Image (cartoon, grey):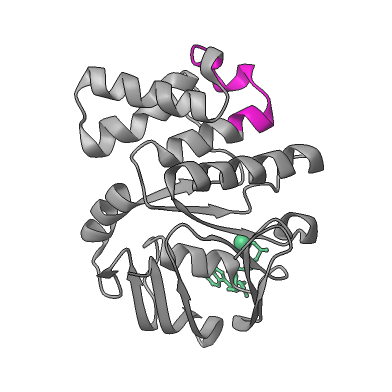
């Protein structure tokens, strides 16, 4: 079963008389445990497409399957439940909750969505802290750690519910080059360990090289698919 199947996917933004065709008849298939990047210039439709895959914004036309479910016409309640159970998100500006510790930030999705018993939750958070190399940082608050460490925490938080799909819109945009490539390496290591599918967007050519499958967007249209240089698929 493919993890994402998009067929003739379109997104139009309408404001008065003006229609912006942000995504135009895009079709593609992504297999489980892939490491995929959408790349393209500013305004090419990367965020719009990721928001549709993440069930944050419905398509205008076409069809979309995520994790075996047709999500094309899901209402916002059902989308929220589906997201919570299936998809993890990593953001450009980390989006950690400042009043919660690192440990509590990672634990949060488990409390919100899955309602795990306390002991099982603690074990799972400790496992994720270790996986991202932050074992001894759990007691700190977000303002006490670096940008790269914040993004490590965000990676752990995205994976803590055992999501099969993680979406990351420009996850390295606020990081220096070296830290950016470490975060991409970490995401790839998480893919190897947990068989999670990662889909990230970037307009940084140096970052995109680390993807195994690259989809290029131009003016909302999908250009040819290519293999990255860093991968084996
Ligand atoms: N909410 C909105 N309402 C109207 N137009 C929008 C909206 N969101 C995006 N657009 C338009 O849709 C097109 C695609 O935007 P999108 O944000 O998906 O691009 P992007 O590739 O993510 O760009 P960037 O690299 O700058 O993040 C652009 O022309 C943008 O102006
Ligand atoms: Mg964007």
Residue 49 in the image: above or below residue 141: below
Find residue 5 and report its image quarter. bottom left
Read off the magenta span: 137-150
Quadrant field for ligand 2: bottom right
Where in the figure is residue 38, as x and y percent of width and height? 61, 67
Residue 9 at x, y percent in the picture: 44, 82
Looking at the figure, which quarter contains the C terminus?
bottom right
Residue 145 magenta: yes
Q: How many marks?
A: 0
- Depicted 66 relative to depicted 121: above or below: below
Q: Quadrant of residue 212?
A: bottom right
Position above or below: 27 against 144: below
211 left or right, relative to 86: right
Residue 76 x, y percent position in the rendering: 26, 61
| Residue 207 within the segment the image draws in magenta | no
For image coordinates 68% across by 46% down, the residue present is: 172
Can residue 174 be seen by looking at this rendering?
yes
Task: From the top left corner, tell me how far across and down residue 204 is, in percent.
Answer: 76, 58
Going by the image, does 47 lie left or right of 177? left
> Which one is in front, 48 or 1?
1
Q: Name the residue rendered at 70%, 55% in the picture.
A: 210
* Quadrant where the image shows the N terminus: bottom left
Tell me the residue at 63%/53% (across/down).
Answer: 170
- Asked if residue 100 shows in the view, the reply is no
Farthest residue toward the front? Answer: 232
Q: At x 46% / y 48%, what residue is drawn?
A: 89
The foreground one among 36 and 229 is 229
């Amino acid at each position: 079963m493919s993890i994402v199947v998009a067929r003739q996917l379109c997104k139009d933004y309408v404001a008065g008389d003006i229609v912006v065709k942000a995504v135009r008849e895009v079709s593609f298939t992504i297999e489980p445990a892939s490491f995929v990047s959408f790349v393209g210039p500013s305004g090419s439709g990367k965020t719009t497409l990721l928001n549709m895959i993440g069930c944050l914004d419905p398509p205008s036309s076409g069809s979309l399957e995520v994790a075996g479910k047709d999500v094309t016409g899901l209402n916002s309640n059902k989308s929220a439940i589906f997201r919570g159970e299936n998809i993890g998100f990593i953001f450009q500006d980390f989006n950690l909750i400042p009043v919660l510790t690192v440990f509590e930030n990672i634990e949060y999705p488990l409390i919100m969505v899955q309602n795990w018993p306390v002991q099982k939750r603690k074990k799972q958070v400790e496992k994720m802290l270790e996986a991202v190399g932050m074992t001894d940082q759990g007691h700190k608050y977000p303002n006490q750690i670096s940008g790269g460490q914040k993004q490590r925490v965000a990676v752990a938080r995205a994976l803590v519910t055992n999501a099969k799909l993680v979406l990351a819109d420009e996850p390295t945009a606020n990081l220096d080059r070296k830290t950016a490539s470490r975060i991409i390496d970490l995401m790839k290591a998480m893919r190897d360990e947990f068989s999670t599918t990662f889909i990230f967007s970037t307009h940084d050519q140096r970052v995109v090289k680390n993807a195994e499958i690259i989809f290029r967007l131009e003016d909302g249209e999908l250009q040819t698919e290519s293999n990255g240089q860093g991968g084996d698929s």
